[in-house]
Image (cartoon, helix red, strand yellow):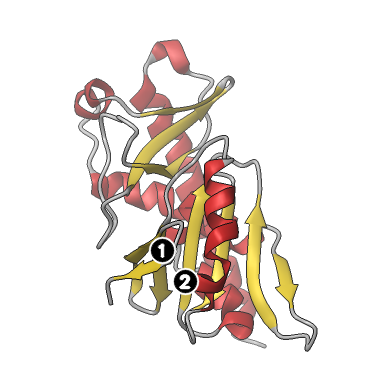
Amino acid sequence: MANGFPYQMHSFVLLTMIIAGASAFFSAAIGDDEKKARRIGIILEGSFESPEIYRLPEGASKTILVPFYEWDYGVRSFTQKIWEERNMSWETFDKIAKALADKLAESVELDVVRNDNDVVEYILIENKDPFLSGILTSGKLLPRVSDMLGDRIHALVVDRNLVYLFPAAGNPIQGYGASLVEDFLAADLPVSLEVFQIDKTGFRAIGELSRERAVGKE
């Protein structure tokens, strides 16, 4: 207890400095015409989208990681022009985006679904925050749900505002394939049917759900 408080204060100050730095960096990065911009972070999109700046998560072919910024009228993806004019790099961006992803992963509400034996079957995360899908990139997500789902989980982002988390053990996500596909087809902001595995090493795509079955790549 005696050593915990200073550590927590240090962590809080560090996070405050990161967020403050992000605001200052962001104001410079977007130009004079968009000074009302606020947060920046990663949003997962389907590969059918056409952002100018993006990268693929490990193992993925249908899902992309896209840098976005928020302003008074929603969110926008970074253009190549802004990216280059401000000498932005993924290393710089990742540090700022990580702070937001971590904050959401630790604070977003979890809808825990249990069976008749009170065993957790999956966790549903539904939230209108445009950066919700970025929680898959956060190292804070797994520790928050591991007591319920285990140390290795499967995640599916059918919509930017809708994330499913399943235990990886026994691959129970396959039993929900049909309903997950229905959610994807009805989504307002569809992402993909790629399944991501999250463990202590990070996250990576391991397969894709289809109408008939889950196609694994492990």
Which residue is under mark 2? 154
Above or below, 59 against 131 in this view is: below
Quadrant that contains the N terminus? bottom right
Residue 119 placement (x, y as % from top left): 71, 85
Pointer 2 with pointer 1, Cβ within 8 A: yes
Quadrant that contains the C terminus? bottom left
Residue 208 placement (x, y as % from top left): 37, 61
Q: Name the residue: 36% across, 25% down.
A: 28
Type of amino acid at the residue the image marks with label 1:
Val
Q: Secondary structure at mark 2?
A: strand
Residue 49 placement (x, y as % from top left): 34, 33
Which residue is under mark 1? 195
Residue 17 visible in the snapshot: no
Q: Name the residue: 54% across, 85% down.
A: 150
Pick the front one: 33 or 135: 135
Pick the front one: 122 or 148: 122
Q: Residues within 10 Å of mark 1 (few under 14, many from 20)?
A: many
Pick the front one: 26 or 177: 177
Above or below, 152 against 63 in this view is: below
Q: Name the residue: 48% across, 65% down.
A: 155
Q: CA distance from mark 2 to mark 1?
A: 6 Å
Q: Is residue 199 left or right of residue 180?
A: left
Type of amino acid at the residue the image marks with label 2:
His
Residue 132 placement (x, y as % from top left): 55, 49
